[in-house]
Image (cartoon, rainbow, N blue to C red):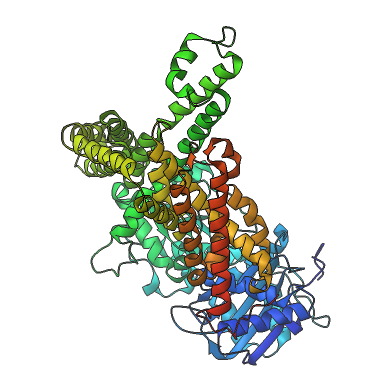
């Protein structure tokens, strides 16, 4: 039968199918061959750009799946229509699957602006690949036409045929035909908890991968099927390219546990606050869905212990890959810093605007001007002085939340919402006793673990409802407050004061060394923990009455602007060293770097870290050292070129920034010209 309003182009045709042939000995060669087929068929304008886009996605996370399957995929502007290329390989090729090489490979290509309907078709194919019968049929197919008919069946009516092949009847929607329904699985594969947990139990999950074409939906189906085998209901919100229906507030409220299987941030994560959570990358949900459902069920039985992450497992069970304490501590601290930064940006920019209107002397009497005057009774300096004082005071108040927000959200990362009150209290005490940023770090950690300890105290069943709202905040605040006032506060304040005095005493080569170190840190991981540590160090000590802190702030911001600007310059000077997609990223990097968004260089660093990151660090070190040597200052913590009015010695700031940008660009060009990448250069050549 004919289908209503079919898309104009078939997703796959016979010329895009390769059966039982060898396309190469590694995944780069296989992807290149399939990309060439898509280009030859008119589905893409540039085979090299398509190959590079697929390999870039591959480098971020291997696309090999258990069972001899691989699904390299990408979205790229050179793709003219959504399409599939299929190869049944002989010999097999390694795509990074845990159980060995793959013999079935689908290259999924989508335009950057692919419509929802096309993305749904591609995701339907990905979901079918978790069905054993579909995979077996692909291996048994005797011709390209049989492969096309199988694909057309699972994508529900999209013409995926050669002109002479009849269009198949539509198959049931993939969401109703999960691989491995409870009936099709051996009894031994049912969850070990299926007899321990009530069948009314419900788990909600969110799945997401960077591209949002394949893994997102395969993980969703795998988790639903695992829930069926465990005798529980799993409801999944897919945050992918083909859209999806968000989980309702009622569904989330009724859930006993949450699974986040994502390689990117969860949109609307706050909706799940207070629920026991299991987290992993999206591929683990495909490879080990039964294990993840078991972990979620165990976390549901011990919600306090499982609320933050992880689960409680019997000793006999093989433990999932666990986060080390170093990684966990880094995540905790970065959570605090990430929530602190909005206060820094808003408060710092308001203070800088106050200086712009009323001059730096406003810092001495802004409070009096605001309290003693109004818009109808202006001070001696007139309207600009009054508005400058208002902006300065408003920024100062916002800035005063810096340390409490840091401590509060560090505690939140450890103990969830019950940790907020003791964490903010610890931060306020740190400010009160003069312990500053360091006191906020320590106080937040103490508050979080204190809240976690109080939460584990045995209480009567009737009192459990009061624990997160009253008991935990009360006793954890008492504990951390006493520790900060009586034991920790004064030593931390002494360390903070000593550090400030040391910075103010630096001269000569010591200043250059500090600037270079800050520059290296800002360019090391481009928005990661090392970058954030340097930035937090600068903003925490920022004070208009402290020249050393203003020089440090200038060094940090200028060095943080270097990576995107250096990559933008290098793509303009030597475009042949970069892919088409990277050249486009280079154009955007000019504005990102000028705006002090270091993350603008991440696409380049992710694709070639060993040659790009050291080059960026060299440029950042030069800029940082020059800023410190020339006594350039900055009184605003963010904004790039948009806060030049807050820069002292603007000419030196621009000179240092230009020097670091040129050094970084020259280094990355030299590295790409002279140093071979680790992967075989012949397999993935660079072209103009």
Q: Position of residue 595 (x, y in %)?
A: 59, 47
The residue closer to the viewer here, 592 or 450, is 592
Tell me: residue 149, above or below residue 642.
below
Q: Position of residue 536 (x, y in %)?
A: 40, 45
Q: Position of residue 44 (x, y in %)?
A: 75, 73
The residue closer to the viewer here, 571 or 530, is 571
Q: Position of residue 224 (x, y in %)?
A: 49, 62
**Residue found at the very far top of the displayed protein:** 377
Tell me: residue 53, above or below residue 600.
below
At 24% from the left and 36% from the top, the residue drawn is 493
Residue 41 visible at all:
yes
At 45% from the left and 73% from the top, the residue drawn is 185
Image quarter for residue 171? bottom right
Residue 558 appears left or right of 507:
right
**Residue found at the very far front of the displayed protein:** 508
At 21% from the left and 31% from the top, the residue drawn is 478
Quadrant in the picture for the N terminus: bottom right
The residue closer to the viewer here, 407 or 91, is 407
Count of number-bearing discs: 0
Residue 216 visible at all:
no
Image quarter for residue 172? bottom right
Image quarter for residue 211? bottom right
Quadrant in the picture for the C terminus: bottom right
The residue closer to the viewer here, 520 or 418, is 520
């Amino acid at each position: 039968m004919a289908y209503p309003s079919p898309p104009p182009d078939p997703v796959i045709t016979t010329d895009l199918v390769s059966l039982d042939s060898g396309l190469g000995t590694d995944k780069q060669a296989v992807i290149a061959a399939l990309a060439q087929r898509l280009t030859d068929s008119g589905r893409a304008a540039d085979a090299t750009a398509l190959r590079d886009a697929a390999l870039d996605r591959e480098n971020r996370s291997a696309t090999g799946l258990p069972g001899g399957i691989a699904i390299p995929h990408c979205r790229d502007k050179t793709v003219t229509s959504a399409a599939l290329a299929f190869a049944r390989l002989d010999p097999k090729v390694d795509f990074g699957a845990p159980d060995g090489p793959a013999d079935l490979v689908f290259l999924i290509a989508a335009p950057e602006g692919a419509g929802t309907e096309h993305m749904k078709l591609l995701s339907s194919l990905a979901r079918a690949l978790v069905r054993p019968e579909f995979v077996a049929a692909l291996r048994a197919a005797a011709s390209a036409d049989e492969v096309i008919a199988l694909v057309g069946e699972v994508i529900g009516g999209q013409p995926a045929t050669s002109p002479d092949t009849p269009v198949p009847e539509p198959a049931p929607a993939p969401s109703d035909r999960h691989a491995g329904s409870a009936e099709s699985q051996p009894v031994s594969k049912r969850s070990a908890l299926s007899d321990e947990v009530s069948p009314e139990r419900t788990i909600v999950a969110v799945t997401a991968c960077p591209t949002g074409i394949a893994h997102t939906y395969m993980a969703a189906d795998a988790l639903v099927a695992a829930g069926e085998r465990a005798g529980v209901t799993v409801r999944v919100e897919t945050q992918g390219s083909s859209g999806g229906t968000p989980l309702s507030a009622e569904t989330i409220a009724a859930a006993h546990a949450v699974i986040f299987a994502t390689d990117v941030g969860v949109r609307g994560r706050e909706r799940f606050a207070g629920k026991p959570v299991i987290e992993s990358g999206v591929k683990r949900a495909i490879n080990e869905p039964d294990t993840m459902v078991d972990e979620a069920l165990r976390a549901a039985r011990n919600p306090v212990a499982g609320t933050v992450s992880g689960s409680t497992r019997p000793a006999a069970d093989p433990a999932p890959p666990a986060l080390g304490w170093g990684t966990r501590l880094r995540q905790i601290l970065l959570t605090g810093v990430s929530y602190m930064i909005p206060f820094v940006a808003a408060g710092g920019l308001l203070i800088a605007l106050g200086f712009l209107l009323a001059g730096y002397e406003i810092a001495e009497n802004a409070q009096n001007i605001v309290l003693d005057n109004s818009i109808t009774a202006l001070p001696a300096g007139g309207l600009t002085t009054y508005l400058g004082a208002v902006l300065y005071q408003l920024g100062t108040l916002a800035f005063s939340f810096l340390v409490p927000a840091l401590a509060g959200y560090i505690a939140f990362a450890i103990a969830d919402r019950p940790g907020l009150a003791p964490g903010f209290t610890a931060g306020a005490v740190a400010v009160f006793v003069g312990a500053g940023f360091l006191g906020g770090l320590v106080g937040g950690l103490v508050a979080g673990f204190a809240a976690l300890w109080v939460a584990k105290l045995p209480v009567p069943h009737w009192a459990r409802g009061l624990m997160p709202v009253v008991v935990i905040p009360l006793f954890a605040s008492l504990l951390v407050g006493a520790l900060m006032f009586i034991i920790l506060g004064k030593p931390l304040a002494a360390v903070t004061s000593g550090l400030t005095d040391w910075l103010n005493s630096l001269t000569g080569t010591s200043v250059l060394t500090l600037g270079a170190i800050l520059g290296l840190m800002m360019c090391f991981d481009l928005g990661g923990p090392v970058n954030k540590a340097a930035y937090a160090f600068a903003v925490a000590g920022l004070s208009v009455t402290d020249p050393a802190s203003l020089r440090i702030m200038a060094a940090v911001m200028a060095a943080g602007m270097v990576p995107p600007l250096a990559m933008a310059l290098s793509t303009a000077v030597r475009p042949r060293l970069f892919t088409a997609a990277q050249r486009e990223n280079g154009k955007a990097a000019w504005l990102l770097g000028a705006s002090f968004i270091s993350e603008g260089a991440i696409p380049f660093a992710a694709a070639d870290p060993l040659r790009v990151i050291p080059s960026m660090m060299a440029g950042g070190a030069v800029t940082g050292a020059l800023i410190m040597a020339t006594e350039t200052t900055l009184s605003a913590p963010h904004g790039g070129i948009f806060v030049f009015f807050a820069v002292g010695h603007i000419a030196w700031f621009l000179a240092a920034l230009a020097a670091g940008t040129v050094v970084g660009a020259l280094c990355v060009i030299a590295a790409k010209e002279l140093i071979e990448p680790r992967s075989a250069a012949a397999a993935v050549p660079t072209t103009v």
